[in-house]
Amino acid sequence: MKPERSADTEDSSTRSALLDAAEHIMLEEGYAAVSSRRLGTRAEVNPALVYYYFGNMDNLFVELFRRGADRSYERQLLALESAQPLWALWEAIHDQSHTALTMEFVALANHRKAIRAEISDSSRRFRTLQLEAVTKVLAEYGNHAVGYTPGALVLLMSSVSRFLRMEEAFDVDTGHADVIDLIESFLREVEGERRPAI
């Protein structure tokens, strides 16, 4: 069962410190290293507070995932409202800053149903946002955007970016520049050269 969001605990600095601690441990040592004791030590609080704020470790992981997903969602909303929404969406999707954490959540989802359900829900929410926005953007660009359907473009950008980041984690980059150029050539054709955000 997924935890409900609680307004009473959203602003708690202790709660935030525990989530920050979990994120750091996951990035440094992997999800398996996250325990209430380690979280308490890292956040400099009593380990029992993990259960006070989250009930159990699954709820903590779900809340940590939600926090990151909400931030990414907001970034993508801003990207899609920019002067060059397709370029901005590509950059938001292609941002590697959260790749390691995402990989940890994917691995965790293999063992925790609550995380798997949360990732599924979040992925559908992102895909809906992206498809609705890209459909509108491509319609506004008209004939210049012919060649890709909104679904194909969104899935191409998302899957290529995710796969490239996974390979880069293993120091593999053969063909990466070519496929990035393929996507960015289309973006240049539709939106022109990437202009700096104002």
Image (cartoon, helix red, strand yellow):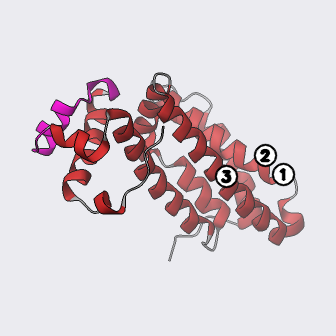
Q: Is residue 33 magenta?
A: yes
Magenta stretch, overall SS: helix
Identity of the amino acid at label 1?
A: Thr
Give the left or right position of residue 25, taking residue 2 as reference.
Answer: left
Does any portion of residue 130 appear in the rendered image? yes
Q: Secondary structure at mark 1?
A: loop
- In the rendered image, residue 31, in percent from the top left (x then y), is placed at 34, 28
User: Which picture quadrant has residue 7?
Assistant: bottom left
Residue picked out by circle 2:
152
Mark 3 surroundings: few (<14), some (14-19) or many (≥20) residues within 10 A: many
Asked if residue 21 shows in the view, the reply is no
The type of residue carrying mark 2 is Ala
Foreground residue, 155 or 147?
155
Is 127 on the left or on the right of 14, as rendered?
right
Give the residue type that dot 3 points to: Glu
- Which residue is located at x 18 percent, y 43 percent? 49
Q: Nearer the viewer, residue 17 or 59?
A: 59
Q: Earlier in the sequence, mark 3 or mark 2?
A: 2
Residue occupying the point 41% across, 55% down: 5
